[in-house]
Each structure stands twice: as C-alpha cells, then as structure tokens.
C-alpha cells in the first residue's frame, strides 16, 4: 500500500524560527496537557474495547466513539509537536481541527472487517520492531536538534522532516491498533 492512499493525514507546518529559551521549559509548560492526555489515553483504551464489540457485531465503528478517538489523538499530536520542539505556539486545550499548525485527520470508514479485530494487534509486530529502531534514531535527532535550535533558532529541515515522518508512521500504526482503519499501515515515513 502506498502511503498516500492510507486514510490518515498527519503533518506539522515547518517553523522558520523557534525560540532559543523555550526549549528549556516546554516540558514544564506541557505538564497540564500531559495530565489531561493521560486520562484521555485511558478513555481511548476503554473506547477501543467497546468499539471491538461494535465492529464485531455491526461492522461499523460508532461515529461518536470514532470522533472521540480522532479528537483525542489530534490533541495528543498537537502536544507532541510542541513538546518535541517542532512548534513554539502553546497548544490549545481542545481537539478541534485547524486550531494549531498540526494536521491530524482520519477518514471515517463506512464498514470494517469483523474478523480483523482479532488479529490487528498481532499483525503490527513488524511495525513495532521497525518503530523501536526509529524511536532510538528520533531521540538522537531530537538531542542534536535541541542544540541546533539553541544556537541557530531553527530546527534543521531534514531532521524536522524525519521527526514528523516517524510520528506519522506511529499515528498510522496507532490508528490501526485502535481499530479505526482496516488498511494495513505502510512502512514509510512519508
């Protein structure tokens, strides 16, 4: 499957300039978001469990649950972009699209496979292995980028694109894991 055909869109607008001092305190400023997101992540787990049975019996993801899952993931994406030094604007306490320079959308499926719900988690093991390696590389890139921002007030474009790509890959895998889509995530950063 080509990445362009996967029904999840994730992107972060590239900032021309970043604050040199904000890199020291973003983790502290993001704590209120982390507290809310920890609750939302637990709720997402419960809703995915409920969606499992809804898909099994109706072949549909209940629209309200789907919208909640996408909204909570969008909020997470906004905070991740801020905490990951990709953006300087403080993220809103909201998951509505268009309020932050991060795009996160998942197309709603009309029907889903009732049998894939049993094996999706198992099918993702190759992704977990590759993502583990990419996360290590992303951590190294983030450390180097931190110093680049400190000295130049810019996130080097290649490093920025790599971080966005790894995050995009992660969100595609998470959407598949949360049963939001039946299409198998591509092995690509694009």
Image: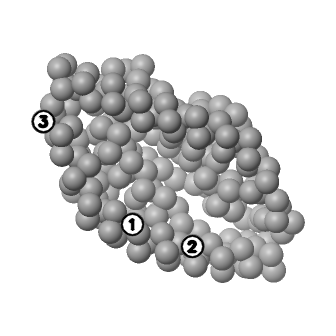
Task: Give me the C-alpha separation between circle 1 and circle 2.
Answer: 12 Å
156 sits left or right of 32 in the view? left
- The answer to whether residue 5 is visible is no
2 above or below 134?
above
Residue behind mark 1: 131
Question: On the rendered image, what quadrant is the C terminus found in?
Answer: bottom left
Task: Give me the C-alpha separation between circle 3 and circle 1.
Answer: 26 Å
Residue behind mark 2: 139
| Quarter holding residue 148 | bottom right
Q: N-terminal of the two: label 3 or label 1?
A: 3
20 above or below 39?
below
- Identified at 74% across, 41% down, the residue is 32
21 sits left or right of 69 in the view? right
Task: Give me the C-alpha separation between circle 3 and circle 2.
Answer: 36 Å
Residue behind mark 3: 115
- The answer to whether residue 42 is visible is yes
Q: N-terminal of the two: label 3 or label 2?
A: 3
Question: On the rendered image, what quadrant is the N terminus found in?
Answer: bottom left
- Identified at 82% across, 59% down, the residue is 25
- Picture coordinates of residue 104, whole percent (x, y): 50, 43
Do the numbered discs 1 and 2 sit on residues whose CB atoms are within 8 Å?
no
């Amino acid at each position: 499957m080509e990445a362009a055909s996967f029904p999840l869109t994730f992107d972060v607008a590239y900032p021309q300039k970043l604050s040199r001092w904000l890199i020291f305190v973003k983790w502290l400023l993001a704590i209120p978001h982390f507290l809310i997101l920890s609750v939302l992540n637990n709720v997402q787990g419960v809703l995915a469990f409920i969606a499992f049975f809804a898909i099994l019996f109706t072949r549909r993801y209940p629209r309200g649950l789907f919208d909640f899952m996408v909204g909570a993931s969008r909020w997470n994406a906004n905070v991740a972009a801020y905490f990951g030094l990709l953006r300087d604007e403080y993220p809103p306490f909201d998951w509505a699209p268009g309020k932050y320079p991060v795009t996160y959308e998942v197309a709603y499926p009309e029907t889903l496979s009732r049998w894939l719900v049993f094996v999706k988690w198992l099918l993702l093991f190759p992704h977990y292995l590759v993502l583990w390696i990419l996360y290590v590389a992303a951590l190294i890139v983030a450390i180097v980028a931190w110093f680049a921002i400190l000295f130049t007030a810019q996130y080097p474009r290649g490093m920025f694109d790599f971080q966005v790509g790894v995050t995009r890959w992660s969100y595609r895998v998470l959407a598949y894991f949360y049963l939001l889509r039946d299409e198998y995530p591509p092995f690509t950063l694009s």
